[in-house]
Image (cartoon, rainbow, N blue to C red):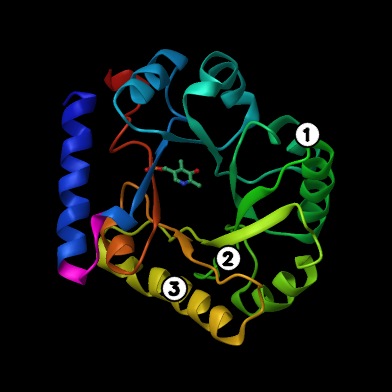
Amino acid sequence: MSLEERIKEVNKRIEQACLRSGRSAEEVNIVAVTKYVSTAMVDKVLGSGLKHVGENRWQNAQEKWDTLGDRGTWHFIGHLQTNKVKDVIGKFEYIHSLDRLSLAKELEKSAASHGLVIKTFLQVNISGEDTKYGLAPEEAASFLKEIQSFPHIQVIGLMTMAPFEEQMENTRAVFRGLRELRDELNRTGVTKEPLTELSMGMSNDFEVAVEEGATWIRLGSILVGKEEEE
Ligand SMILES: *Cc1c(COP(=O)(O)O)cnc(C)c1O
């Protein structure tokens, strides 16, 4: 399948998931995850009408960003080491992986020195697997309170990763859990602005994530492919 065909197919599946759950497809944004592919492929992705690209390691992203940075909106989706913050600030508009106070402090310092506000998702480990990064759900409220005083960090929502499941349906509880946590945090009003966004769903499980309220889905293999398939 060509990139255009894959985009069409993914959009169709998003629309169907929205129909099943009474949502509007306009609420669902796609982050094209380009970590498996070359700069030339990212060029094609940005030429296809997709605007948002996601990378999980600065080392892999650097050449792509240096070549194509101004043509897209960049999302940092992987675990972010504190000593890499200075590399990504000012380049990546969104960080999907805010998961600890030391990272928040470094982001605040770096964003302040660039005179910008960085949009972030709080990463939450809903499934509780110890191989996954993220705060425990019960830590989210106090963490958000603690970083209220960081004016250069704007938390716009929550992010999670579901375990890999053969049956997509088995991921539903994780995605629902993230949505319910967001709604609960909004009810108790721990943030000045309500958290509107949910970053959840990947190639293997995005339809269930959309049904459960995802506003950002992060699609690599199913959409962008892997380089050896090109
Ligand atoms: C790689 C990656 C994705 C995309 O994975 P696919 O299964 O290829 O869609 C999404 N989110 C994160 C955090 C990733 O590291």
Which of these two is toward me, 227 or 140? 140
Mark 3: few, some, or many residues within 10 Å (few <14, many ≥20)?
Answer: many
Could you tell me which residue is drawn at 54 percent across and 68 percent down? 195
Residue for point 42% across, 23% down: 37
For residue 179, the mark is: 3
Disc 2 from disc 1: Cα separation: 23 Å
Identify which residue is drawn at 65% across, 67% down.
135
* Residue 86 numbered mark, or none: 1
Nearest to N terminus: mark 3 or mark 1: 1
Q: CA distance from mark 3 to mark 1?
A: 31 Å
- Which of these two is toward me, 162 or 94? 94
Q: Secondary structure at mark 1?
A: helix
Dot 2 amino acid type = Val
Circle 3: residue type: Arg
Q: Is residue 205 in sight in this rendering?
A: no
Q: Is residue 108 above or below residue 60?
A: below
Q: Select label 3 or label 2 by which is in front.
A: 3
Would you say the beta carbon of the disc 1 residue lies within 8 angstroms of ligand 1? no
Residue 38 picture location, percent across and down:
44, 17
Measured as percent of width and height from the top left, residue 118 is found at: 67, 47
Q: Magenta residues, as a range?
A: 20-25
- Does the magenta-highlighted stretch encompass residue 142? no
Instruction: Tell me the distance, in whole angstroms, between the alpha carbons under discs 3 and 2.
Output: 11 Å
Residue 21 magenta-highlighted: yes
Q: Which mark is residue 124?
A: 2
| Few, some or many residues within 10 Å of mark 1 (<14, 14–19, 20+) | some
Relative placement, left or right, of 12 versus 43 is left
Amino acid type, mark 1:
Lys
